[in-house]
């Protein structure tokens, strides 16, 4: 009888440990797939970048930037699931399925859908150069 009780207690302990490991694995997977921290970092990076450039064009899928006092243009685009600045390759955000950018006085409205299905939207303030 003692062996049966010991076996029941041991199986209860093993079940509890396995359940705890499973819960931890699910929470870890969920936190790794959550893109909210990357989204907030992207908004901050865009705000910093836009403070250095003038916006020349926004057409919904790309932002064309002009360096003040120079005749150089840059673009922020989505290609190969990455939002990055060209020329060159300065990535801002990875695993992006789609994005939309709209310009309004005082800022950019940005909507992003990640490959995992999460969507975010936000406003990046724009400082007008020369004002």
Image (cartoon, rainbow, N blue to C red):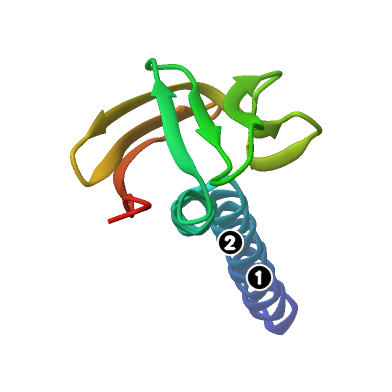
Residue 57 or 44: which is nearer the viewer? 57
Q: Residue furthest front?
A: 69
Residue 66 visible in image: yes
Q: Residue 118, percent across and down?
A: 42, 34
Tell me if label 2 and label 1 are in contact, CB under 8 Å. Answer: yes
Q: What is the secondary structure assignment of the residue under circle 1?
A: helix
Measuring 59% from the left and 67% from the top, which residue is drawn there?
20
Q: Residue furthest right?
A: 88
Q: Report the Cα–Cα distance between label 2 and label 1.
A: 5 Å
Residue 78 or 113: which is nearer the viewer? 78
Measuring 58% from the left and 24% from the top, which residue is drawn there?
77
Is the residue 61 above or below the residue 120 in the image?
Answer: above
Q: Find disc 1 in the rendering and name its residue.
A: 17
In which quadrant of the rendered image does the C terminus lie? bottom left
Is the residue 62 above or below the residue 104 in the image?
Answer: above
Measuring 64% from the left and 32% from the top, which residue is drawn there?
71
Residue 97 figure quarter: top right
Q: Residue furthest left?
A: 105
Residue 85 or 57: which is nearer the viewer? 57
């Amino acid at each position: 009888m003692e062996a049966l009780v010991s076996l029941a207690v041991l199986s209860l302990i093993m079940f509890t440990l396995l359940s705890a490991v499973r819960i931890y694995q699910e929470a870890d997977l969920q936190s790794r797939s959550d893109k909210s921290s990357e989204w907030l970092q992207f908004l901050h990076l865009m705000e910093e970048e836009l403070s250095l450039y003038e916006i020349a064009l926004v057409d919904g899928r790309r932002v064309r930037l002009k360096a003040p006092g120079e005749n150089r243009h840059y673009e922020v685009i989505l290609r190969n699931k990455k939002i990055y600045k060209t020329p060159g390759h300065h990535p801002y955000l990875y695993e992006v399925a789609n994005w939309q950018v709209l310009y309004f006085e005082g800022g950019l409205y940005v909507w992003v859908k990640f490959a995992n299905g999460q969507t975010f939207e936000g406003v990046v303030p724009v400082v007008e150069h020369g004002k």
